Image (cartoon, rainbow, N blue to C red):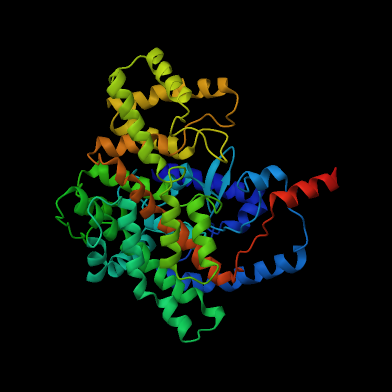
Amino acid sequence: MVFRSVSLLSKLRSRAVQHPGLRNSVRWLQTSSDVDLHSQLKELIPEQQERLKKLKSEHGKVQLGNITVDMVLGGMRGMTGLLWETSLLDPEEGIRFRGLSIPECQNLLPAAKPGGEPLPEGLLWLLLTGKVPTKEQVGALSAELRSRATVPDHVYKTIDALPVTAHPMTQFATGVMALQVQSEFQKAYEKGIHKSKYWEPTYEDSLSLIAQVPIVAAYVYRRMYKNGEVIPMDDSLDYGGNFAHMLGFDNPAMLELMRLYVTIHSDHEGGNVSAHTGHLVASALSDPYLSFAAALNGLAGPLHGLANQEVLLWIKSVVEECGENVSKEKLKDYVWKTLNSGKVVPGFGHGVLRKTDPRYTCQREFALKHLPEDPLFKLVSNLYEVVPPILLELGKVKNPWPNVDAHSGVLLNYYGLTEARYYTVLFGVSRAIGICSQLIWDRALGLALERPKSVTMEWLESHCKKTA
């Protein structure tokens, strides 16, 4: 593992030298012994503020592309319209966190054990600073998050006021809203804090929120599925490991899966529904709790985070009708049956990606390592071969390849987390890391209130006639 990391580090240094843009956005080439994340940010923020000021003054009038009617009618798909520092989605390569691909993060970020999956705390450090942290820095951040992981009693009482049958995302988002009463940003704003200092109470709220959401999420799970028997946090465990433990899973492989899951689901640039919603609401100077709760409500939609629930339910429907050892021919028939009924095959396709999602690939590698003989994993592998050619045959799909949701449910199901309705809450816990990291930078950079222009169909028709 050490030699592999050194070799990769050498390659990345070379790549950064060849690509100045990457060198500017990724600061991991620098090293620092400072284990305090707040101090690191205090040092980085003035430099990035000047960088943004220069970008705006020197290049503010540069055009980034043309807007078509298709883009306006198609949900602003493909428009470049947001600044999102923490990650960038490449249609061919997939997500990069501060310039690093998922395999690079797996190799470079500290792990709980040699050769293990990256710790989510390490990714949080990377997203906020642009630097790959040391093991000591990750350890200090992990300890800080544990110190903030206290949830007030009123939060539990608020959740308990809901029917136990309420959707897990409803209960989770309600719990996050109940946390809002402790917002340091709201208190500071009411006292008249200068806007140049907005990022500091935002930082306090964000780290507290990140620390608390696994506890709230675990409470919802235990309330719904385990007779309300709550499992306390284990101070010896890291962020991802503790989340799995509080849910009730202590299999070391499940702890590793949760570390991987939280890391790869944390951020996916700013245009997806949950990230964009969090950014939009925060642009009105709503605090991190309000902004993240809004993001969760977007994540709960079946075209976004709820998709991982839909995938496992669909796979189980295949098993119910065709059996676990279904042949590829019968699998093709079932796929066509799904499509001909006016439905989509969940877990395939992506709004931006044009190749197999790297988040799918790393989960597949995890399965090959830990559960190669699992029948549902074998079924997912067969779907990887069967579904894309069928979608290509339809001729309407730009990306027929599997996305992140195509695999996660099978892994969770294997280790005993079988309640598919709950899966989106796991997604929500991980997404807190990405959304809050960017929100801190939104405040530090003083990004503006988001207010795009809207038009009517009559305006579009009139404009197009004039243009023609």
Residue found at the far bottom of this picture: 191
Q: Is 47 positioned to the left or the right of 282 in the image?
A: right
Residue sitting nearer the eye, 31 or 385: 385
Examine the rendered structure and indicate whether residue 155 appears above or below residue 363.
Answer: below
Task: Tally the marks.
Answer: 0
Examine the rendered structure and indicate whether residue 76 appears above or below residue 129.
Answer: above
Residue for point 65% across, 60% down:
452
Q: Is 298 positioned to the left or the right of 136 in the image?
A: right
Which quadrant would the C terminus be assigned to in this image? top right
Q: Is 379 positioned to the left or the right of 16 in the image?
A: left
Residue for point 75% across, 69% down:
57
Examine the rendered structure and indicate whether residue 325 appears above or below residue 45.
Answer: above
Examine the rendered structure and indicate whether residue 23 appears above or below residue 149.
Answer: above
Residue for point 79% across, 49% down:
462
Q: Where residue 321 sits in the image (x, y, percent)?
A: 30, 20
- Asked if one can make out residue 363 in the rendered structure from this viewpoint, the answer is yes
Q: Where residue 184 sits in the image (x, y, percent)?
A: 40, 77
Question: Which quadrant would residue 94 be assigned to in this image?
Answer: top right
Q: Where residue 146 sits in the image (x, y, percent)?
A: 28, 65
Question: Which quadrant would residue 346 be assigned to in this image?
Answer: top left
Residue sitting nearer the eye, 441 or 456: 456
- Asked if one can make out residue 129 in the rendered structure from this viewpoint, the answer is no
Q: Is 181 positioned to the left or the right of 52 in the image?
A: left
Residue for point 38% across, 43% down:
1
Residue sitting nearer the eye, 433 or 113: 433
Residue sitting nearer the eye, 87 or 247: 247
Q: Where residue 8 sits in the image (x, y, percent)?
A: 50, 44
